[in-house]
Image (cartoon, rainbow, N blue to C red):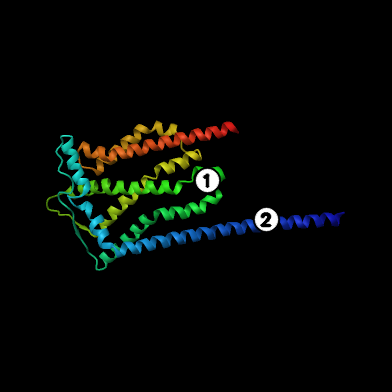
Amino acid sequence: MAEETSREEEPTKKSKKTVEEKAEMSFLDHLETLRWHIIKSILAICIFGTVAYIYSDFIWNTIIFAPNSHDFWTSQMLIKLGDLFGYKSAGLMSKPLSLINFDLSGQFMVDVWTAIIAGFIIAFPYVMYQFWSFIRPALYENERKHASGAVAIMSGLFFIGVLFGYYLIVPFSLDWLAGYSISSQVSNQINILSYISSVTSIVIAGGIAFELPVLVYFLSRIGVLTPKFLRKYRRHSYVILLIIAAIITPPDVLSQMIVTIPLVILFEVSIFISAHVDKANKRKLDEI
């Protein structure tokens, strides 16, 4: 009997060992899969970055340097809106920034880094698709259905945020910084590296900021964030948004409203999303 028991225990131990080894291999396989998704994303960024580097003249002269001009779309629209509402506006960038380069390899390095950033922006939907492909198998079937358009939504919000940063935040920020002076004895001669880092950081920050509804969705899904909390601090949030708009825009109400309204809409959309997820969570609890 003892021999039979020991024989029965041996296969049980072996089976447990096999399960543990499979689980360990499964974890290593997941790491390997993630590595390939990251490699594919980096390759996509490099490919689009190379294309951006080839067409660097268009990117620099038509896109990057455009906000540093009085003829930029935002400046002209501000003048037209001022005329429409009976408000006289001088537009933006009446005194464009004077850009210089200090380092011998400065312009080359700036050109390369700008191409990489442009590559990341263009390749963003593909990068999101790669990460979604990695996460998707771990989700339940109903979760996959609810999040079926995640890549398209995240990519759309990112590009809207990029455009918001480029057409609103960048020109207002440049105009304010160009006009800021501590003394008439000091003239502004801005290093090209400083200019491009300011423009790209604002644009990328705008894209990330517009992912707020997605972040709110996932935080509300796991119960970290609630619509009650967002509504409670709504007034505080509005004050913060107005302060941000006042800092980056000229000292007039029209400019501040142009920047503040999209941010307020984004916050309200986040509250709506949080409320929708909260209701879904409560329904699930009631069913249980």
Closest to the observer: 250 or 53? 53
At which x and y percent is residue 283? 54, 32
Identity of the residue furthest to the right in this view: 1
At which x and y percent is residue 229? 43, 33
Badge 2 element: helix
What residue does disc 1 label? Answer: 144
The label on residue 182 is none
At which x and y percent is residue 253? 21, 36
At which x and y percent is residue 9? 78, 55
| 233 shown above or below 39 | above
Q: Amino acid at mark 1?
A: Arg
| 161 shown above or below 194 | above
Q: Are marks 2 and 1 in contact (CB under 8 Å)?
A: no
The label on residue 19 is 2
Give the mark, 2 or 1, whose residue is nearer the N terminus: 2
- The quarter in which the N terminus is drawn is bottom right
Task: Determine whether, in the image, residue 14 is placed left or right of residue 272.
Answer: right
Badge 1 element: helix
